[in-house]
Amino acid sequence: MSMNTQGRPTSPGEAGEGGHTTFTGNRALMIEEALIYETGRPDVTGVDLADVDDTELHLGGLERSDAPNLPGMSEPEAVRHYVRLSQKNYAIDTGLYPLGSCTMKHNPRLNEKVARLPGFGDVHPLQPVSTVQGALELIDLVANGLKELTGMPAVAMSPKAGAHGELCGMMAIKAALEARGDARSVVLVPESAHGTNPATAALLGYEVASIPAREDGTVDVAAVKERLSPEVAGIMLTNPNTCGLFERDIIEIADAVHAAGAYFYCDGANLNAILGRVRPGDLGIDAMHINLHKTFSTPHGGGGPGAGPVVLSEALAPFAPLPWVVSGKDGFDLIEHAGQAGAAKPFGRMTAFHGQMGMFVRAAAWMLSHGADGMRQAAEDAVLSANYIRACLKDVMSLPFGDRPCMHEVLFDDQFLNGSGVTTLDFAKAMIDEGYHPMTMYFPLVVHGALLIEPTESESKASLDLFIATLRDLAMAAKRGDTERFAGAPWYAPRRRLDETRAARQPVLRWTPQAPSEPEPKRDAAE
C-alpha cells in the first residue's frame, strides 16, 4: 500500500512562498506549547474535592496565608500539556545522539523490564537484610563483574555518578597517603582530562598541575616525569583520552608515578572503548570510576540517576568507603560501620545507602544478556563505528592529529571551515535543522573549534551512513559559501538560536505572575 500523493504537495519544502503565519502559532501538528502557568486558570480544577474540616495545625505558624497561585487545568488539558512536553525531548530513542565523551547508547528494553520487577522496583534501603537477600546478591554479582572486567581486587559500589566516583577514588588515595603519614599537596592532570578531574582534585584541597599534550594528542610522558616529586599525591588521567586516542605509554606513566610514591587515578568515562579488550588493573591503575549509566547502557542524560562504582587496587582496597556487601554461610550481609570492617580502614561513607539499585539491575541485565564475548563485541563495534565516520569524512572535515585510528569517538577540528565564514557553533546549529542533536563542541580544549563525535556500538550502518551523508552535505555547503544556511540556523527548531552567554549566565528559570501593567509574563531568557 502506498500513500496517495496526487493533487496536493506532500513535503514541507513545497509550501514555499505560499507558507504563512498560523493563527495559533502552531506548525501543522507541532504545538506551540505555552508554560502551564500561562495556560492554566486559578478557577479551574481537574477534580472536585470536599472542603477540608478544621484540623489541628502542626507547622508552628509557618502556614501559608495566601493561595499558592498554582495553575488550574482540567485533566485532559494537564495530560495533553505533559504529553506534548515529553514529545519535545530529543533522546536516543528518537535519533542518533553523537555527543562525544558521553556515550548516549541504546538502553535495551529488557533492562527496563527487569528493573521494574516488584522485587527490585519496590525494594527499600531500610528493609531488614534478611528480606533483601536477592538485591544484595545482585549488587555482589555486579561488583564481581566489574572486578573481573577491570582486573581490580575491590570495588566501591555506592558512588552515584562519574564525578562522585572521581571524588571517591581520590578520597581513597588521600586516605592511603594519610595512613602512611605522607601528606602531599599536588595532583597532576593532563590537558586532555575531563573538566571534572581538576575540579575534584581542587575540592579535596590539592593544587592542580597541568600536564601538556604532545603533538599527537597524547600525554607527554617526559612532562609527567619532570613534574613528579615527593609533593605529588597522584595523577588523574583518562584513557582512552578525550581526544579519542589510547594512551599507549600508560604503563610507563604508571611505573613513574608509583616510583615517586604517588597513586594513579584513571577516569573511566571511556571504558566502553576497551571493555573486554584491556584490564585497567594490568596497566598499573590504582583507582578508576566506572559509569554504569554509560558503559553498561543504563539511562544517561538529564541529570540521572547514575551510578559510578570505583574499582580499587590492592593498595587502596582497605580504604574503600562504607558500606559494602559480604557473603557468608548465612547469606549476604552489609558492612555498615568501621567497627565491622576488620583490618580495613574505610575513609567513611559517601552516601546514605548502598547506591542506585535500579542502575545495578540494569547493568546486571546488560552484562548477563551480552556475556563476556558480547561486551567485548560492543567495545569493538563502538571503535569500528567511530573509525567508519572518521574514514568517510576525512576528505571534507579536518582531523587535528592526522589520519590515524581513533577509539570510540572521533575528533575533528575547525580547519575545514577556515575562510568559509562558518564557525563550529554555526555548523552544530545547522545539524539541528537536519534532525540531529549536535556533537560535543569546543571540547577538548586542546583542539581549536573541536567537534567530538561518539556514535556508540548501537547504531546501524544505515543510521551511520545517513549521519555521514548529512555531515558531508553540511561541510560542502559551508565550503561553497552557503553561509545563510548556517548563520541563521536553526531555522526549523521551535526556538531560533539562543543568546548562549545570557542563557548560561543570566537564566530566568522562575515564572512570575503578570502584573496588570505588563504586556506579557516573563519567560526563560533562553528564548
Image (cartoon, grey):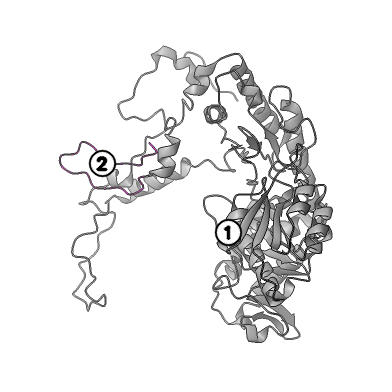
- Residue 448 locus on image (x, y percent): 62, 33
Vertical position of residue 99 compared to residue 50: above or below: above
- Residue 221 locus on image (x, y percent): 79, 48
Q: In this figure, which residue is indicated by the disc labeled 2?
A: 521
- Disc number lying in front (1 or 2): 1
Packing grade of label 1 (10 A; few <14, some 14-19, many >=20) is: some
Q: What residue sits 78% from the left and 63% below the top?
A: 260
Near-viewer residue (211 or 504): 211
Report if residue 320 is visible in the image. no
Q: What residue type is labelled 2?
A: Pro
Placement of the N terminus among the 4 image quadrants: top right
- Residue 501 locus on image (x, y percent): 44, 38
Q: Which amino acid does label 1 sit on?
A: Ala
The disc placed on residue 202 is 1
Packing grade of label 2 (10 A; few <14, some 14-19, many >=20) is: few
Quarter of the image for residue 93 reads top right
Placement of the C terminus among the 4 image quadrants: top left
Report if residue 330 is visible in the image. yes
Q: What stretch is highlighted in magenta?
A: 508-527
The disc placed on residue 72 is none
Vertical position of residue 123 compared to residue 109: above or below: below
